[in-house]
Amino acid sequence: MIDTVAIVGVGLIGGSFGLALKAAGFRGRVVGVSSSATMQEALERGAIDAGLDLANAAGIADLIYLSQPIGRIVDTLRHLNAVVKPGALVTDAGSTKHAIVTAARDHLKRARFLGGHPMAGKETRGVSGADPNLFRDRPYVLTPGDPQELETEKAKEFLSWIESIGARLVTLGAEEHDRLVAYSSHMPQLASTALAAVIGEESPDAVNVGGPGLMDATRLALSSYELWRDILATNTGAIEEALSAYIGKLEFLRENLRTRAVQEEFVKAGEMARRLRELPLR
Amino acid sequence: MIDTVAIVGVGLIGGSFGLALKAAGFRGRVVGVSSSATMQEALERGAIDAGLDLANAAGIADLIYLSQPIGRIVDTLRHLNAVVKPGALVTDAGSTKHAIVTAARDHLKRARFLGGHPMAGKETRGVSGADPNLFRDRPYVLTPGDPQELETEKAKEFLSWIESIGARLVTLGAEEHDRLVAYSSHMPQLASTALAAVIGEESPDAVNVGGPGLMDATRLALSSYELWRDILATNTGAIEEALSAYIGKLEFLRENLRTRAVQEEFVKAGEMARRLRELPLR
């Protein structure tokens, strides 16, 4: 039974997970591990019931939810084994999985690990933006190294909470996940960043004539590098592959601007863009 | 005095221009030149007062507003000289300017020409989507070959109508306009089309995990090629230049994913993206 949950890193995702658990009827205890200012705010918001340090939280938790930045999650995994309650389930919410799953396999021996990535977020960061409905109708990816990781009693209980908070479970291998998000998230981010950077360098007067399409295309460019440093460092190979495919496609378009080949690309792209809109929540 | 306006091509832009003129207090006559089905709908919507063929409309109009696709505008300009009312002002709403301005200079001798590009639009095409407020707070670019083109009596009257319908006048050279929209509109379109096409080819399962950022980045990919064929054919050089700069930036990011150089690009891109949002209506 999951009686005590420890949320390590009570930011937007961690705080929302605490609020969502409580809203879904979780009657156990939720403890948070964060800076004292954040824990105070999380307590006031009702996202956690108490703030503890990592050792004390890990010593009593049946489920440990690591919702720090990727690099911090890897660090935490290196120290967690010494303090974890034996048999606990450790999961995470990091945006790339290979580095985290590898760190867990190498360092976490006294507890079970199940990698996760809730596909949720919003523009407001931190626990102040925490929202019990953040996960609702959004994909929640789990990356078991072995299907049996989903069959333990604690894992089944955790899965049922994911469903109770309204998320849609998706199961992928860690490498499969990382390649997929390289295309669905990391490539679009860098495409938008590069677009806005090039306009700034080559054509800053675009501010005088920009329309709604340019706003859409540059919205991701507003993202902070702070959120992306660890992603780019831990998924470099898959991102390089995706960017190379993207550059190849742009070169093809550039060489064919006056030919029918571009029409075929518009048709293919339109079909994919429509599919993304038909099934955004599957 | 502009007593009679002929709108050639009564689609979204032409129909909106007719509605906007009337809403702004234009008391003259607005005639339309389009297919008979479109003219019927435009009459019902009140965007025009009568439908005529090109020769009859051009023979009575003081202002001729060409709001067809670019290739059709160039065709119309080739035939307009023989039928135009001498001294009329001819303007257009085409998305690229060099090819149109050149056609006007070569073929239109009995009337004055002033190139234009209202930076307005929406997803619904055709006169059924026409909206008297379509131009409100949006840039309206004029591309005089010589500043004196703005000083004729008819031009000044036309400019005052542009202001009356709520648009913001921006004056640019035709080449300057075309280079600017290559960066602000054509490059973002192709960036989005390439992104969706690559995802469709390399990672179609992205439909299972796509978030709001991917929706933003692929929204332009929903555009129809039909609208883009003439743009790509008439602004090829500037678009090739913009795509090359974009490809160069993506290559730089790909080579530097783990370095601080990417942070600088995020900062530059974020600044430009914020500037676009501070001044979208200037």
Image (cartoon, coloured by chain):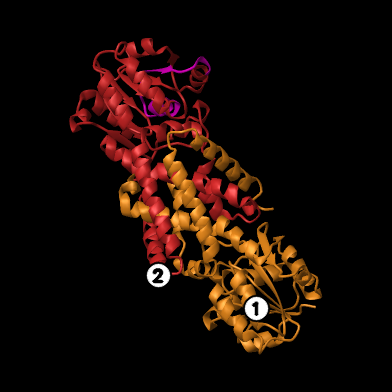
Chain colours: A orange, B red
For residue A179, which quarter of the picture? Answer: bottom right
Task: Please tell me which residue is depicted at 50% across the width and 23% down the height of the picture.
Answer: B45
Magenta highlight range: B15-37
Horizontal side of residue B276 vs A94, given as left or right? left
B141 within the magenta span: no
Image location (x, y in percent) of residue B86:
25, 13
> Outermost residue toward the left?
B148
The answer to which quarter of the image holds residue A143 is bottom right
Q: Residue at x 29, y 34 (%)?
A: B142
Secondary element under disc 1, as helix, strand or loop, is helix
Q: Where residue A120 sits in the image (x, y, percent)?
A: 61, 62
Q: Which residue is mark 2?
A: B260
Residue B22 lies in the magenta stretch:
yes
Determine if residue B68 is in view.
yes
Residue A135: x and y in percent read 65, 62
Residue B214: x, y in percent? 55, 53
Q: Give me the chain letter of mark 2.
A: B
Mark 2 touching mark 1, by CB under 8 A?
no
Q: CA distance from mark 2 to mark 1?
A: 28 Å
Please state if B225 lies on the left or on the right of A279 as rendered. left
Residue depicted at x 60% and y 41%: A271
Q: Which residue is mark 1?
A: A104
Q: Chain of mark 1?
A: A
Q: What's the amino acid at mark 1?
A: Ala
Do marks 2 and 1 both belong to one polypeptide chain? Answer: no
Depth check: B180 or B171 in front? B180
Residue type at mark 2 is Arg
